[in-house]
Structure formats: structure tokens, C-alpha cells
Amino acid sequence: MNAPLNGHALLDFNSPLSDAKAYDLIGSLHLRPGERVVDYGCGWAELLLRAVEHEPNARGLGVDSDDYAITRGRANVEARGLASRVTLELADVTSWEAKPADVAISIGASHAWGGTKETLDAMRARIRPGGTLLLGDGFWERAPGPKSLEIFGEEDFGTLAELVDLAMACGYRLLSVTTANQDEWDSFESRWCAARERWLLANPDDPKADEVRAIVDDHRDGWLKGYRGEFGLAYLTLARL
């Protein structure tokens, strides 16, 4: 994929997530020696790599359909000496088949499965009984305005409490819940835009400059004039019954 249109170079994670919260989430998984972690929709797999580094005897598998992200992730696997314990696959997560994991991760990938309930059901079939799911999914922090509904209108998001209730109705118990705070959101959105803005500053006469400028302007307007403070992202650590 063309780098300026991808624009993830300045992001640590492809979600609003700080270093401190990332390690809190990893801690909530209570990884044990020899356990297998599978990240469905892993992107460049930064959270997966940190989880495997946290538990030196754990093994990791990441699956994503984004070639740019998988290429970046594989380079990180090699650079951090994790090639013997982490594998990243370029594939459609919905059709990827593997034996049930001890721990599964699915953050911001509900669109691939068709919705939150479908994701919870799909993950439950991919986790051993008693295993753990780290789910990252959207919810409304407050009633959405017209701009937010224009952007997310086709997604069936509810409140945080409704998201937790849904997870429990799908065969899980809640172990931990946290949400992305405003600083994490602002950092994520700023860096998403900044990767493109820096490219535009360096390439003002590039034939794709107008296209990239339109993408970043539209995204910034959607964020600042729409879903900022309305749309939230929750991280649920769930035990599979």
C-alpha cells in the first residue's frame, strides 16, 4: 500500500492506547508459560509482541489482511528477536483456521466479522474453555450528534454497560474493563493526521498531494467536529465460559 495513504508510521498502536495502558491490559491477561496468544486483526502486532515479551515462554500468532501492516510487523518480530515464538500471517481473519487459543485478542476488528456480537461469537469458537479474550470495541460515551452518526451510522454501538452485558450474554465473564481516555484519543488522531501532513510538507507538488490532503482534512473534521468525546473505545478482558 502507498505509504502516504496508509499513514501509520507515527502510531505505536492502531488504536487509542498509551504505553501504560497497554501494559495494564497485558497484565490483565495473566499469561502463563507456554500459553498461545492469537491476535485477530493484529495490524503490525505491537500489542501481541509486547505480550509475548512480557511472558518469555508464551507464543504468539497474528493474522491481518493488511500487507503493509504485516510487513512492518514481521520486521519488528525479527528486530526484537522473537522469530522463534511469533508468527504473523497475511490472511482474512474470518476464514483463518487454527486450534483454539489460550488467549485471543481482537481490537477494533468487529467490522471484519459484521458486528460486536458476531465478533464475540467468532472469538468464543476460537478460544479454549476457560481461556481469555481481550476485546477492543466501540461504544457511545454520550448521545452521538449528526456528524458522528454520519460516520458510524451503520455500526450498532450502545453504551459501555450494554457492551459488557452483550459480552456476558455471549458466554463470557468480565475480568477487567477500561476505556481509552481523551489524551489517548487525541494522541492517536493527531499522529494519524500528522503522518500525512508531514508527507504533504515534504511532497507539496506530488500528483497525490490533493488526494492525501482531502483524506486528512475529512478525517480531522470528522474527529474534531464529530465524534471527539462522543465515540469511545472500551477494552474488555473476558473469561470464556
Image: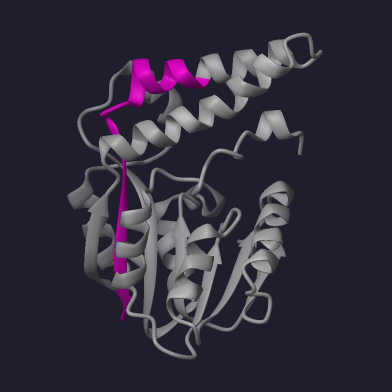
At 52% from the left and 42% from the top, the residue drawn is 11
* Residue 237 placement, left or right of 72: left
Picture coordinates of residue 229 (x, y %)? Answer: 26, 29
At 43% from the left and 20% from the top, the residue drawn is 222
Residue 236 colored magenta?
A: yes
* Residue 8 placement, left or right of 230: right
Q: Quadrant of residue 196?
A: top right
Residue 183 colored magenta?
A: no
At 44% from the left and 81% from the top, the residue drawn is 55
Q: Quadrant of the C terminus?
A: bottom left
Q: Nearer the viewer, residue 176 or 17?
A: 17
Picture coordinates of residue 168 (x, y %)? Answer: 25, 67
Give the magenta range. 219-241
* Residue 159 placement, left or right of 149: left
Outermost residue, right side? 207
At 62% from the left and 68% from the top, the residue drawn is 80
Let me know if residue 230 appears in the view. Answer: yes
Let me know if residue 171 appears in the view. Answer: no
Q: Is 31 above or below relative to 116? A: below
Picture coordinates of residue 29 (x, y %)? Answer: 34, 74
